[in-house]
Amino acid sequence: MENGSAIAVETVGLSKVYGEGSTTVHALRDVSLEFPDGEFAAIMGPSGSGKSTLLHLLGALDKPSSGRVIVGGTDLSGLSDRKLTLLRRERMGFVFQFFNLIPTLSAEENILLPALIAGEKAGKYAGRLDELLDLVGLRARRTHRPDELSGGEQQRVAIARALVRNPDIIFADEPTGNLDSSTGAGVLDLLKESAGRYDQTILMVTHDPRAAAFADRVVFLSDGRVVDEARDPDPEGILERIKNLESAG
Amino acid sequence: MRLRRFSGISLRNLRARAQRTLLTAVGIVLGVAIVFGVITLSDTMASTFTDLYSRAFGAADITVTAAGDSGTFDDRVVEEVRGYEGVESAAPRLSLPASLILETKGDNGLPEVQTMRLFGVEPESAALATGFELTEGRFPESGKELTLDGGSAESIGLEVGDKVTLGTPRGPEKLELVGILRVPGGSFGGFGFGMAPLSYARGAFDEPGRISGIAVEAAEGTPVTDLQERLDQGLGEGLQAQRSETRTQEISSQLQGFRISLLFFAGTALFVGAFLVFNALSMTILERTRELGMLRALGSTRAMIARSVMTEAIILGLIGSLLGVLFGYGMAKGLVYLFGRAFLFQITALVISPFALVSAIVVGVAVTAMAALYPALRAGRVSPVEAMRARAGGTGKRSSRIWSVLTTLFGLLLLGVGAPWIYYLAKNLSADLDGLVYASGIAAVIGAFLGVSLVIPVLVRPLAAFFSPLLRLLFGVEGRMAAANATRNTGRTALTASALMVGISLVVAFAALGGSVLGSIRTYLEGSLGSDYVVQPASQNSDVTFSKALPERISRVPGVESTTSLASTFLRDGEEVNLVFGVDERYPDIFRIDYVVGGPETFAKLEDGGALLGKQLAEARKLGVGDEVRLPTPEGPKRYPVRGILENDVVGGGAGIYLSRETLARDFNERKGEFLAIKAEPGTDRDSLTREIRTILRDYPQFSLYSNAEWKAQIEGDFNRQYVFFYAIMGVSVAVSAFGVVNTLSMSVFERTREIGILRAVGTTRLQVGRLVIDEGIVISLIGCLVGVAVGSLLGYLFVLGSGAGGFEVDFFYPKVPAIAALLAGLFIGVFAGLLPARSAARKGIVEAVQYE
Ligand SMILES: Nc1ncnc2c1ncn2[C@@H]1O[C@H](COP(=O)(O)OP(=O)(O)OP(=O)(O)O)[C@@H](O)[C@H]1O
Ligand SMILES: [Mg+2]
């Protein structure tokens, strides 16, 4: 992060094959991409085009069949599960489509979870916790359990959780998929604001052109390949491109 | 309280799933409780018996008895012993089975009888002869005086100075109570200890000049071991001198076998409890797949996840074990009570050892931790990608075909090794089996159980299909759907059914053994006993004997065709155990006997000092007519020429050695009878015959007259009482596995919340939904019980095979009633276990269920 032009995540010839024999699926084929530091990138494409697969590989959640993923200059290929885990712990944050909050923990405990996992004292995060609760507007809800929160509130807790240890990169798979459009917009504003404030890279998978319009860049996937890209997109432009892709496919 | 540490999540999980935690803990609680109960029972028994034994027989430094530790010897030995250098004092005693005739009348209108052991002692050495301490009065000195244990005196209501009636072979005699003894362990309901002057005891019990033991005190400065060795060498082959400590140790080592068997049965409950833990944790982890994936995505290492599951298990194990020990205290009390009822020996004081406490808790936690190991490792292996998936694992990954083939093969292998090994052990079981062999037998049984458990998964589908029409008949469409539901997660169904299988099969196996022993006894009685009546001790824990007068008087009753009586002695000769009977020439008139060699006339010819052998014994020792059988007598070993071999040795169960009454009296000083069989003349009025015999027995209230039917009923009653004790222990493991069914059903309801909602939405009634769950419970538990019955029958057959080692040959009788009862129990457990989960399924709101994600 010393200089704005460094690469946060990079893939080289990335492929992922599921299954074998007649059930083989080429989810990703030879994908090479670069995501500079501080970029907010959206990944779009038809269902089954490999968006989630790409995100999983970038986020060190899964291993590629071939090709490499390089995160902040570190090649993930040779790393053990333990090294990968520590890498996720220290440098990455995740926002999931289904929030994935722990039902037995309160909102603030859920937010603190990454710190607890890293073996840090909860007390050290008191200030950070307040800051995040203000950011996501859930100060009054801090001791509520997930089942006492609305969907949008749950997703905001999940975002606060992703941010709590100031990760370099935030991965989000359809973070607004389960939210109505105005709540979704609120969540994305939040993500963008935070990323700007802490100089974080965001990689987000989405189906929604309006969500993608929040990004600095949109990458289009189809059948496991990168087929298009757009900078500083607006919803109409994105829709246009998707239509073009479909007629081309 | 705010979560402070990652590991705190374990506790949260336990609390959040409180109901499941409780259900899972029940297995541990009951398992630990029964283990603790059994250890405490056997500790209590060991301590009571060894204490009692050492007081009754071994308080002195050295004890001299007849070789083989049974029978009497001449009292001149006392003077001989006193002549040894280093002997401070020597106290003779004559130990006799006796009984007290009480004033109270029993249900049959006859006086009640209390069984006791009577020691004839010399007044001047009474204190040394046994180890009992006086609490009141004095030791017996002369004439008809009795000193009695405090427990018996209290329960009968006797005080020093009272008169008490002693049943003797020559009839009831009144003695004066002159002292009270303190006996360890409090009171043994129904069993007493007493002392009377040696001279009186010899007269009343027809043992002139005889004693059965000498308590020897070494002089100061004389090494006890040295004196013991000199005595043992010097007194000749017919006698043995042992350190009293050695004798006490023998007793406690004899109890070891009993303890191990009990622990085995108790252990199965814990084993089943472990199944429960394994099952519950595996399911919890499946349910939490996405959560675990998320934790992995957020940077928890595999080890952290595995550790947190292990922490959960260990907390569970600790809580369960602690509760188990508390509960186990009650269990121990119940077991001691049942034991007392079964074996007519009530112990009042429980011995709770720290060992029992610590080991029950350690074992409980260890078993829980072991059961959690695999689920914990699997939890660690959950991929972080799971966090991103739309739905969690759902019904769980179907294990690959290869894996299931492998586990099935491994199961078959375990069965293939375990079952033949049990068979081999059962076939070649010797009366004294050593610990290692015993342990390997238990390992084989456990191995076979594991084997069957591994095979059950492939049986689930066919069996469910097999039950499906039955359920459809009983419950309509729901029944069929339930059968299908049970096969949706064959692994879980199999695991739950396996747990049930273990308990049920043990019960069935045990019932098979019991039923076979009983059935064989019945066959023997029906086929071989030609008498119409028997005279037996009135109280079942008694081994009182009678002198010649009783059979003589009974045979003079008009209508009695003939009588025969037996005398017996039990001789240990090194490793060999000899069951020796003294019979008269009328024996073959009353017992129907088939002969390998010889005929009824050989019994008459025994008077010349010959012997007849049971077939199994003859085969085992490779003896035939013309050979001699060697027996240890108080005068040293003697040889008896074999005159014949019995094909069906009714009394000795194949291992009997038959001598004439005269030989037994001459060489072993065993002259009293203990079994009297009476054959009536055909056409005699039975009522008047029994009346007359009962009149004679009024002089011998310690004996009762039984018709064959009454006697059989009596034996069966004794048997069943003893079985209740074992069933109680095994019942615990069945109960634990029933909780396993509850657990599985509630998880299956939880998992199918959405599905249940959809069913309800399309018009399924609450009742139908509930029935669906109950039916699934029935399918699961029927599978467990059916396989349990099959395995239990087989195991029972092997048990029966092995039980032949005692000498008594047992035929296998298929346990029909227990098998049917077990299947009904399967139905019952299914319904019962399904009730709560069914209620929660029926109560699910439709909207909530459909929205559930
Ligand atoms: N674990 C898996 N095993 C087998 N095939 C898989 C697996 N995960 C994904 N696939 C396949 O890989 C391809 C890409 O899947 P992916 O989840 O990346 O698509 P996606 O672009 O995220 O689609 P959607 O928009 O529907 O979420 C699909 O064809 C999918 O069926
Ligand atoms: Mg996707």
Image (cartoon, coloured by chain):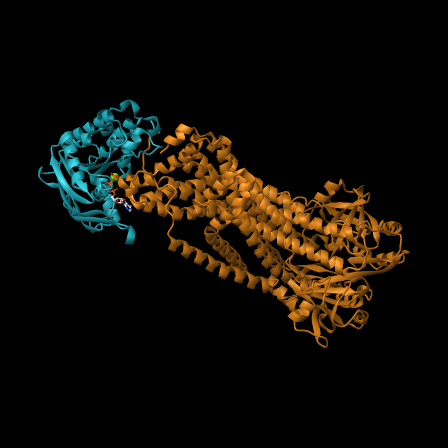
Chain colours: A cyan, B orange
Residue A184, image quadrant: top left
Residue B391 locus on image (x, y percent): 33, 38
Q: Is residue B12 left or right of residue B271?
A: left
In the picture, the quarter occupied by the C terminus of chain B is top left
Residue B99 locus on image (x, y percent): 77, 50
Q: How many marks?
A: 0
Outermost residue to the bottom: B626
Residue A1 appearing in the image: yes
- Looking at the picture, tell me which residue is in the foreground, B595 or B211: B595
Outermost residue to the front: A247
Residue B36 appearing in the image: no
- Looking at the picture, tell me which residue is in the foreground, B696 or B789: B789
Q: Is residue B702 left or right of residue B188?
A: right
On screen, residue B663 above or below B853: below
Residue B299 locus on image (x, y percent): 26, 41
Ligand 2 positioned in quadrant = top left
At x 42%, y 29%, the residue is B846
Residue A114, image quadrant: top left
- Looking at the picture, tell me which residue is in the foreground, B451 or B560: B451
Residue B128 locus on image (x, y percent): 69, 54
In the picture, the quarter occupied by the N terminus of chain B is top left
On screen, residue B476 above or below B654: above
Outermost residue to the top: A140
At x 46%, y 51%, the residue is B457
- Looking at the picture, tell me which residue is in the foreground, B358 or A138: A138
